[in-house]
Amino acid sequence: MKLEERVFSGMQPTGSLHLGNYLGAMLQWIELQKTHNCMYCVVDLHAITVWQDPAELRDSIRQVTAAYIAAGLDPKKSILFNQSQVSAHAELAWIFNCVARLGWLNRMTQFKEKAGKNKENASVGLYAYPNLMAADILAYRATHVPVGEDQKQHLELARDIAQKFNVDFQKEIVAAGFEDGVFFPQPEPVITGPATRVMSLRDGTKKMSKSDPSDLSRINLTDDADLIAKKVKKAKTDPEALPSEVEGLKDRPEAQNLVGIFAALSGTTREAVLAEFGGAQFSGFKISLAELATEKLAPMADEIKRLKAEPDEIDRVLADGAERARVVADPVMRKVKEIVGFIG
Ligand code: AQP
């Protein structure tokens, strides 16, 4: 089982994907697809760590799959699938529940944010979420994980789990034929681009998120031109004109966010955007931003709608992806079981 470079990443089907998901992660996914073996998962097991209505969940799984394809992920080239169809994720997550330490999970900021004040009432799954994420990646011995900045801490935990597993079972790993004692790789985060953390349109200090109660806080990949224009127009800004240098964006979170979004959507840098718009008022800049966002996103929204109208076709893509994912995960899981000391 030679270790090859492999890319793994996923999104939760907890609603419609938004611009943060697209710029923070998916643009990198599309790039990596050109050079690597890639697996892109719809992480439905993660979604149920908070309550999901079953009918809505089913619809969101198809919606996210449609968005993957509409954004440019090719199901023939990359493996597109949903997590719950491949049992290796849940099996390996249990083993990792027994490798990871409570102290490690206690440090996870996402759990604290999502559980809020009522953490006694949060699901055990929400707490153990990072162990499942480590299993998602390592069930395929994936080496590269393109994500937004908010996932950095979880990725570090996945690296710690891989390392501890390799150390705890060193003797067995060598006996299983891995002479260097390395069974799991240390997965590398790939966090690149001008918009690795896209912020809410209503509050430049908060991450753009599917679960934000205000729909005006995000641009969904399913929004039409009118809605995009409305949301950009209503986006919070400060009263100053745009600066001509990037340093001038300091302490101006909303300006920083909108300039970053413009740069990412147009495939340039923030410097280039400010060279063009420095000194302009937000009202004019917002018109250009709305036009750019519509040009890039509206065709994707149409394509998502078209694909969603054929749920059988989406289900077929997912079933095919799951079958190909199992081919990669099964031999890894057989070795894991042998290493841990299970029979059969
Ligand atoms: N605002 C963001 N900026 C940049 N990247 C982002 N990502 C999410 N939000 C932003 C990246 O998208 C990928 C998938 O995220 P996810 O759907 O699995 O979960 P999340 O990070 O929890 O996203 P949300 O929108 O905040 O969902 P909810 O509200 O349901 O929790 C990841 O690579 C993430 O970094």
Image (cartoon, rainbow, N blue to C red):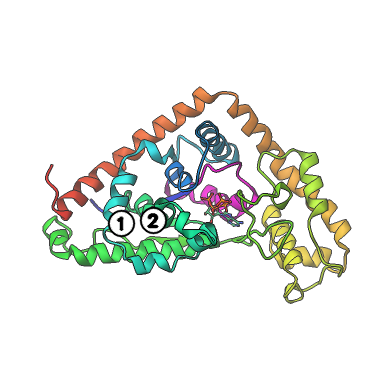
> As drawn, is 148 to the left or to the right of 37?
right
Residue 292 picture location, percent across and down: 76, 49
Mark 1 residue crowding within 10 angstroms, few (<14) / some (14–19) / many (20+) = some
Give the amino acid at mark 2: Ala
Instruction: Please count the marks in the image.
Output: 2
Front-most of 283 and 194?
283
Residue 245 picture location, percent across and down: 77, 74
Mark 2 residue crowding within 10 angstroms, few (<14) / some (14–19) / many (20+) = many
Q: Is residue 288 visible?
A: no
Residue 151 picture location, percent across and down: 49, 60
Task: Tell me if label 1 and label 2 are in contact, CB under 8 Å.
Answer: yes
Residue on which disc 2 sits: 128
Task: Classify residue 228 by image quadrant.
Answer: top right
Residue ID at (42%, 57%): 127
Q: Which residues are magenta?
A: 12-38
Q: Which mark is residue 97?
A: 1
Residue ID at (74%, 38%): 224
Give the amino acid at mark 1: Asn
Q: Which mark is residue 183?
A: none
> Helix, strand, or loop for circle 1?
helix
Q: Is residue 69 magenta?
A: no
**How far apart are the alpha carbons under marks 1 and 2?**
7 Å
> Helix, strand, or loop for circle 2?
helix
Q: Is residue 27 magenta?
A: yes
Residue ID at (18%, 49%): 337
Front-most of 37 and 150?
150
Q: Earlier in the sequence, mark 1 or mark 2?
A: 1
> As drawn, is 342 to the left or to the right of 223?
left
> As drawn, is 162 to the left or to the right of 42?
left
